Amino acid sequence: MTPESFTRNIFELAVTDCVTGYEQALTYSEIDEKTDETWNSVKRFVRELTDSDRVLLMMLLKNISVDTLTTFMGILDGSVVIEEYFEDFELTYDGGDNLAGSLKDLLVEIDDER
């Protein structure tokens, strides 16, 4: 596994698939009494939006997902420091080379491609 393939796979799972899943759930899943009321309220809110406002909300959700994942990748790379932890972080796959070092930049590049 290369840093590029790792980052692409993480992006697909954590951004593309999650945003699509939220969009489907908020737009099409039933509102029922067994579901958390906050979730039902958000479903009602989304369903009252115009199509263009719904697209804008999903773009915002995608941007939030990318920003969160970028911060996490920066932690793995060492460019974002967690207080009290200053040691280098190593991420390897099956004992191979360190994957970390450019994950944050790769994630931004992947997002820019889309």
Image (tube, rainbow, N blue to C red):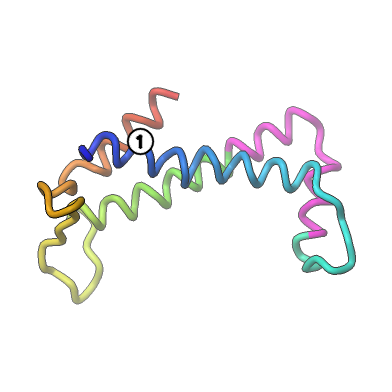
Placement of the N terminus among the 4 image quadrants: top left
Q: Is residue 50 magenta?
A: yes
Q: Position of residue 24 (x, y in %)?
A: 71, 41
Q: Position of residue 92 (x, y in %)?
A: 17, 53
Residue lying farthest to the top in this orientation:
113
Q: Is residue 106 left or right of residue 26?
A: left
Work out whether residue 53 or residue 92 is closer to the camera in this orientation and state it. Answer: 92
Q: Position of residue 40 (x, y in %)?
A: 81, 59
Q: Position of residue 4 (x, y in %)?
A: 25, 34
Work out whether residue 79 or residue 6 is closer to the camera in this orientation and state it. Answer: 6
Kindly identify the residue that appears in the image at 66 percent across and 40 percent down. Answer: 57
Kindly identify the residue that appears in the image at 25 percent across and 38 percent down. Answer: 105
Work out whether residue 105 or residue 94 is closer to the camera in this orientation and state it. Answer: 94
Q: Is residue 84 left or right of residue 59?
A: left
Report the predominant secondary structure element of the magenta stretch.
helix
* Relative height, residue 104 to residue 112 (above, below): below
Q: Which range of residues does the magenta coloring cover?
A: 40-59
Going by the numbered disc 1, the residue's amino acid type is: Arg
